[in-house]
Image: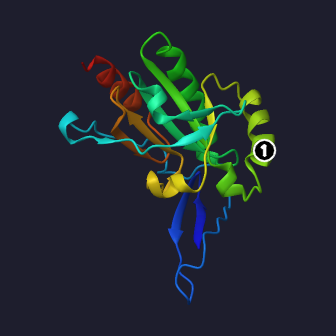
């Protein structure tokens, strides 16, 4: 089973094995409303272009039910942010993501939020998760697309915690990875580096 535990505003995951091996994936999450000291200000170094790996593929629905794939954003720098509605650290950085989306709106850039509420909240369906996520998006005035994530992303993106943020270059490769609450100025600097790449 997979157990997700929250330390301050960052949720971390660890895999536990039952007596008969891996008996199934069960997700549980204990959320807090504040973030712990030391959990803020994650920095990342941009990976050299020759060393970058392709972002794992996904097909996820937006709030209207339209499926989106990571390849739909090819040609843009993408800030891919994994979050959950009850995650304190996630709530802390959302205003910064809104500002980054606004600041770079005219550039070849977009923030894409991936709600992990289905996996973390134990919702029975994406519709059930959307019933919580849609009001959250409206209340917090998110100005960027939000997709509904699923448990497969935990493995494919090696999610050890939420929030988790990936900067993806214009060719669809992971250029930088942030675990925990981002440092906004570091992310902004890295976005500018990626936008300047040919």
* SS at mark 1 in the image: helix
- Viewer-side residue, 21 vs 5: 21
Residue 1 % position (x, y) = 59, 74
Q: Quadrant of residue 133?
A: top right
Q: Residue at x 66, y 26 (%)?
A: 142
Q: Is residue 33 visible?
A: no
- In this rendering, the count of numbered labels is 1
- Viewer-side residue, 132 vs 68: 68
Residue 30 % position (x, y) = 68, 62
* Label 1 crowd (10 A; few <14 / some 14-19 / many >=20): some
- Left or right: 186, with 65 as reference point: left
Residue 161 % position (x, y) = 51, 55
- Viewer-side residue, 22 vs 10: 22
Q: Residue at x 57, y 33 (%)?
A: 68
Q: How is the image coloured?
A: rainbow
Q: Residue at x 54, y 79 (%)?
A: 22
Q: Is residue 195 visible?
A: yes
Q: Quadrant of residue 42?
A: top left
Mark 1, residue position: 127
Which residue of the protein is positioned furthest toward the left in this rendering? Answer: 50
């Amino acid at each position: 089973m997979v157990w997700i535990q929250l330390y301050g505003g960052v949720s971390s995951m660890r895999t536990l094995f039952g007596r008969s091996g891996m008996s199934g994936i069960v997700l549980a999450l204990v959320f807090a409303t504040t973030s712990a000291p030391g959990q803020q200000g994650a920095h990342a170094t941009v990976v050299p272009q020759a060393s970058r790996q392709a972002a794992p593929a996904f097909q996820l629905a937006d709030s209207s039910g339209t499926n989106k794939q990571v390849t739909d954003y090819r040609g843009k720098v993408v800030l891919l942010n994994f979050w959950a509605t009850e995650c304190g650290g996630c709530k802390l950085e959302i205003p910064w993501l809104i500002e980054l989306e606004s600041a770079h709106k005219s550039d070849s850039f977009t923030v894409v939020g991936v709600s992990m509420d289905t996996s973390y909240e134990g919702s029975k369906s994406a519709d059930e998760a959307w019933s919580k996520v849609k009001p959250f998006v409206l209340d917090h005035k998110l100005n960027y697309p939000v997709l509904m994530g699923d448990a497969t992303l935990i493995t494919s993106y090696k999610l050890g915690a939420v929030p988790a943020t990936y900067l993806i270059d214009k060719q669809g490769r992971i250029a930088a990875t942030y675990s925990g609450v981002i440092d906004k100025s570091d992310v902004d600097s890295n976005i500018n580096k990626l936008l300047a790449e040919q």
